[in-house]
Structures are given as C-alpha cells and as structure tokens.
Image (spheres, helix red, strand yellow):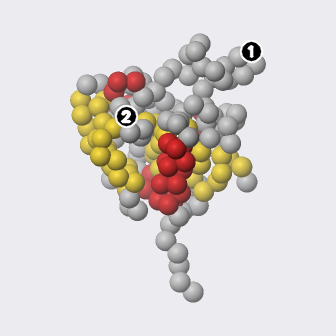
Amino acid sequence: MMEMTSSRPYLVRAMYQWISDNGFTPYLLVDAGAEDCMVPVAHIQDGKIILNIAPMAINGLTLGDEAVTFSARFSGTTEAIYVPIDAVLAIYSKENGQGMMFNDDAGSASISAPGSNDAKSNGTRSNGTKSNGTGQDDDTSPDDPGAGPGRPSGPKLRVVK
C-alpha cells in the first residue's frame, strides 16, 4: 500500500486562503526550536513564535510543501523567515481564533474552534508592534471586541476531536 504525503502543507494553504478570503488576519503559531527554523530570536517566547502572515505585513510569501518562507520587518530590520512545514503548530485568524491546530504527528490536524483557552496555554505572542511584521496587539486591549465581563480577550484555539 502506498503512503500518502503529509496533508499539513495543503491544509495550511487552504486555511490561509479561507482566513484571507474572509477579510481576517492569518497568524501562524510556530515551534521556533524546530530544526532549520529561521525566525527572529528576540520574539520567541516559550520556544514558540506567532507570525502575522497577512499580505500587508510581509513580502514574498511562499506556502510550499516543505516550508513557509517570506520576509518581514521586525523592530525595524528586514528578516528572511524560513519555517519548515512540520514546525507549523497552528494557523488561525487573529480576530476570532478560528483556524486549525496540528498534532505532533506530521500531517495530522485537528479542527479548531474559537472561545477556548488552549491556544493561550500552548503558545504566546511576540512583543512586536503592528509595523514590525508580526502585527500583534496586546491581548488585554480594551478595544478587543471579544473582551467583556467574564470573557477572556483575544483569539483562542480549541482542539476538537
């Protein structure tokens, strides 16, 4: 029986297109410690980094079968980013948290839903500003439409099995 290739690059491309087509900001949660991963070290927290991959934040995006590559500005310096596809832990919308989280097994994925605290415990935000290519805001922003009494602010992911 023939073995299939990983579905991860196809799912990353599909989720990127879906998020972008709906007018939202696609974010990648990346395992920054993965072999050959080239991301700005200053923005890594707990071994992970969140990257804004919206067209207005980056240049030359390639969502390939082996890696995600692009260039972006971080703290005023343009950097080439190389993320092996297996280092992509999740792709989701900044605004509502909808997207997909990937299991440790290459090619496996779980559908995610908004409103869960799982993403916050699994990944952290970098300290960049909107102009540096990461496009992240502080989770505690009072302007966050998801915030309110008894509701955590910011996008969240939840693994649905």
Q: Image quadrant of residue 92? A: top right
Question: Does residue 142 appear anywhere in the picture?
Answer: yes
Q: Which residue is mark 1?
A: 149
Q: Residue at x 57, y 53 (%)?
A: 102
Residue at the location (65% across, 51% down)? Answer: 111
Q: Residue at x 49, y 71 (%)?
A: 5
Rendering coords of residue 61 (x, y %): 34, 47
**Residue 123 at x, y percent in the picture:** 54, 36
What is the quadrant of residue 141 in the picture? top right
What's under tag 1, amino acid-wise? Pro
- Judged left or right of residue 115, residue 73 is left
Between 146 and 43, the residue placed more toward the observer is: 146
Looking at the image, which residue sits at the far bottom? 1
- The image quadrant of residue 19 is top right
Pointer 2 and pointer 1: residues touching (CB < 8 Å)?
A: no
The reply, left or right, for residue 96 in relation to residue 150 is left
Q: Earlier in the sequence, mark 2 or mark 1?
A: 2
Q: Residue at x 41, y 43 (%)?
A: 32
Q: x and y percent of residue 154 in the render?
A: 60, 26
Relative placement, left or right, of 26 versus 72 is: right
Instruction: Tell me, for residue 56, which label it has, or none.
Output: 2
Residue in front for this viewpoint, 108 or 33:
108
Residue 90 in view, yes or no: no
Q: Quadrant of the N terminus?
A: bottom right
Which type of secondary structure does the marked residue at label 2 adopt?
loop
